[in-house]
Image (spheres, grey):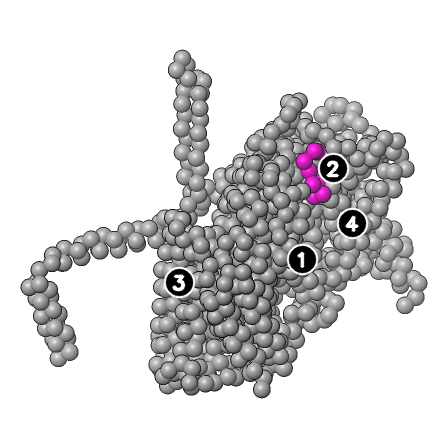
Amino acid sequence: MTGGQVLAPILVAGAQIVIVGVGGLLLLGLMRKLRSRLEGRVGPPIHQPLLNVRKLFRKQRVRPEESSWVFSAAPVVLVATAVVVAAISPLATTRPPLGRSADFFAIVFVLLLGSAALALAALDTGTPFGGMGSSRAMTIGAIAEPALLVAILAMSIPAHTSNLPVLVRLGLTHPQMIASPGRILALGSFAIIILAESGRLPVDNPSTHLELTMIHEAMVLEYAGPDLALVATGEAMRFSLLLGLLVNLLAPWGIADRPGAVALVIGIAMLAVKVALAGVCIAIFEVFTAKLRLFRVPELLAGGFVLAVLGTVTALVVR
Amino acid sequence: MSNLSLVIAATAGSVAVIAGAALPRRTRVWAVVLSTWASCAAALTGSLIVLHTGRPMVLSSSQILPLTGVHMVLDPLGAVFVVITAVVAIASTLYWIGYAGHGLSTRTAAASLPLFILSMLLLPAAGSVATFLVLWELMAVTSLILVLGDQHERAETRSAGQWYAVMTHVGAAAILLALVLLSAHSGGQTFAAIRVHAHHLSPALRNTAFLLAVIGFGSKAGAVPFHVWLPKAHPEAPSPVSALLSGAMVNLGIYGIVLVGDRLLGGGPVWWWLVVMALGIASALFGALHAATSTDLKRLLAYSTADNMGLVLIGLGASGMFAATGHRTTATVAMVAALLLVVNHAAFKGSLFLSAGSVQVATGVRDLDQLGGLMTRMPITGAIFLVGALSIAALPPLNGFVSEWLLFQSLLHGLPTSSTAVAIAVPLGVAALALTGGLTLAAFVKATGVGFLGRPRSPEATAAHEVPRTMQIGTGLLAVACVALGVAPFIVLPALGRASQIAIPGTSASVLRGSKYLHVAGLQGVLAPALLAASLVLAAVVVVAVRRLVHRRSMLTPSLRRAEPWGSGRELQTARMQYTATSFAEPLQRVFDDVVHPDRDVDVDHVVESRYYFERISVRTSIGDIIENKLYRPAIRAVRWWGRQARHLQNGSVHRYLAYGFVALVLVLVVIT
């Protein structure tokens, strides 16, 4: 094995991790800026989330009195799972390292490990808000996860595999597969799930300041300093990861399908453009949407579930 | 001489029974444990030889059982179940050494425990109807004695024992009917003879036998609607027994369905397996939903057993359907997935029940609403429970994830088949599988988070301390198995492949290949569990290093401070302000209100001066089992009513009884002629 063969996958993985990490934080800044402008405010600069993370890393670590090691471990698990998924997913290239084992089901379960860690840590704080956030997040997750898994199944049936790089590459070679009704329904369901999983409107309000209405923010209320920086980074990574997968399944064009630095750079640029566009759409949507009542959220998610099941049935019938 | 191990296992097991019944209290436990280990080790060795060579082990003796004799044939399919039982038994008897100080140390218990284990070790080796039924009954009776344990004066335990006794014997009757029907029409009571004749039997007979077997074995496996005994008996049983019930005994229900459906009858029409899959879907969803809303730790675990057995039945059903439509390779993959889930379930549920027992020993409560803060007080038990919880929630890199992935892949692989029934059933199975996964995660985040994390909610939990070392090791053994099977499932896959070949003959053994990648035949995707685990660990190490590096470079003050958590400005928060298991599950309960049907009692006492102010509010919520309340209770009431009506027949008059006898005789004569 030559040096290039060893180094290239590491470089690709590193590039994807950095673009997901930094890009994810910038994406949040961009969306916040756009929302502010649309609402007639100036808003913070786009790179504000990066500045926040840098500031938080310099602060002291604070832990609730009665918490255990689970509380400190959760942010690490959250970021580690996002890093692993960012390294092996087909984001900038269809040939990521370990791409053979980048199974869609496996990736969902790896990300789920991060959510579970955060939910456990929230209960470990020993406060009412932690439990509240954890309970709500798990309720939403218990309905969102099945919808996501069935949506993956719907996308996997025509391709005969749930391997992600293959799914994305098939979109390049057989563009008609993207327009198949089964895939469209499944991607619609996937989009709803992304909003729920990453705590966006109409499921959760990421900029709320009232504890009683919080879901995700209530879970991480006790984090401070470097731990909060990790949580913020992890959440940003997960959001941009899911969006990246969505846009690549919907419009794979531009992704690097051949080895080589030039293709990779183009792939990264195209990924940034596509994800930014998706983020802009979500930001505009959020301006015109109100948060749903908590007990209406399951109805939305059940809608996503039904879309996914319909997608599966359509994929079986329309072949 | 290969059958020597079965003889040794039986002998050592019998020695254990005698030791338990005869020895004085001080030496009893150790003697029983050591001879049970010898018995398990012998059975384990024999099974591993069978799994390695693929040749069955035969043992026949006409002297042991009068009239029928004993026939033992241990093939690779049975060997898998023997291995599972042996490992769970070794771990739970080790645990029992420490536990015996807190109960389950009477002569009756010490003699029944090894007999129960022995009957489960030998059952999968039974090669004839009589041997099978004798061992099955032995298992039923000894497990009943153990469920009653030394708590038999408690009303709940007695009621649980009653339910268990009735359900297990109704099941045993169904199994008896099925097997006797088959053997009566096959001209022999050995399984080999039945297998030869099974194809010449009439379809009606085959259908009846299969349905009876599904009812009988399904009730042992806890399949909804025959599950009612399970959430009663498993929590009431002493914890080492619960671990054996959930980790070993329910598996034998699965074994029985494979035995009758695949092995004896050689597969059947698609609708048989649709029935199995429907039972599986119902059990998985019902079990998961009740696990998510339960507040009793052991009841939660018991419902989750019903849920996992449901998933296994989904796998078995899919496997049978694929085989019936001619897709034998896919059928084998589904069968391997189902068997792997059985293996994994034994590991994580065994360890979870044992750690729940440790919690009960340390605190005396198993109500989650009174626990909390145990992770700092019982760090080892807490960590073991966490491993078990993450495994059962199918999170990587633990074992539950591998079987869940394999089950998904087999269902995905089997979808493009020609049959319409299959094309409708499989997406439903996948939806059930997915929904179950989400609910299970919620249930076990609740169990771990409320039970072990946060602040202690009662004085008992505050005073908790770690349990004896043997209990920790026994529990930890199974947790290690969870990690090992998650990182390297390849250590069991060849054996499971052999076992599936026995159930579904005519396929190649290597549907699952590779030692680094898990590769399913005919699918492009692979899973690399070891690589995934390694990269997760590596990423975590890097993240910790980065946090420490960046943090230390810019730190002036001491790096970690413990502080009072935020309470909206309120000082001195109490443990009672935390979310409990009840409040955690409340949103889910509300979403699935129609299925769960909670009973809610609200008592409000108003202040005398104004009705706008409350003096006292008490809320009582309980979640009953809807199937028990709507299906079984009316049936029991009907039987009671009939019983009362029948009482009028008996008024104590001898003349009347003679008249009954005469009328009955005349009726019989009329019928005969």
Give the residue drawn at x 62%, y 44%.
B465
Q: Which mark is residue B540?
A: 4
In the rendered image, residue A267, in percent from the top left (x then y), is placed at 83, 51
Mark 1 lies on residue: B398
Q: CA distance from mark 2 to mark 1?
A: 38 Å
**Label pair 3/1, CB-CB below 8 angstroms:** no
Does the magenta run of residues contain A70? yes
Give the residue drawn at x 89%, y 63%.
A5
Give the residue drawn at x 72%, y 43%.
A69
Label 2 CA crowd tier, 10 Å (few <14, some 14–19, many 20+): some
Observer-nearest of B236 and B495:
B236
In the rendered image, residue B612, in percent from the top left (x then y), is placed at 44, 17
**Label pair 1/4, CB-CB below 8 angstroms:** no
Q: CA distance from mark 3 to mark 1?
A: 33 Å
Q: Can residue A220 be seen from the camera position used here? A: yes
Question: Which residue type carries mark 2?
Answer: Val
Discs 1 and 4 lie in a common subunit = yes
Q: Which mark is residue B168?
A: 3
In the image, taking residue B465 as reference, residue B235 lies left or right, namely left
The residue mark sitting in front, 2 or 1, is 1
- The secondary element bearing badge 3 is classed as helix
Question: Which residue type carries mark 1?
Answer: Leu
In the image, taking residue B218 as reference, residue A34 lies left or right, namely right
- The secondary element bearing badge 2 is classed as helix
Q: Chain of mark 2?
A: A
Q: Which mark is residue B308?
A: none
Discs 2 and 4 lie in a common subunit = no
Q: Chain of mark 1?
A: B
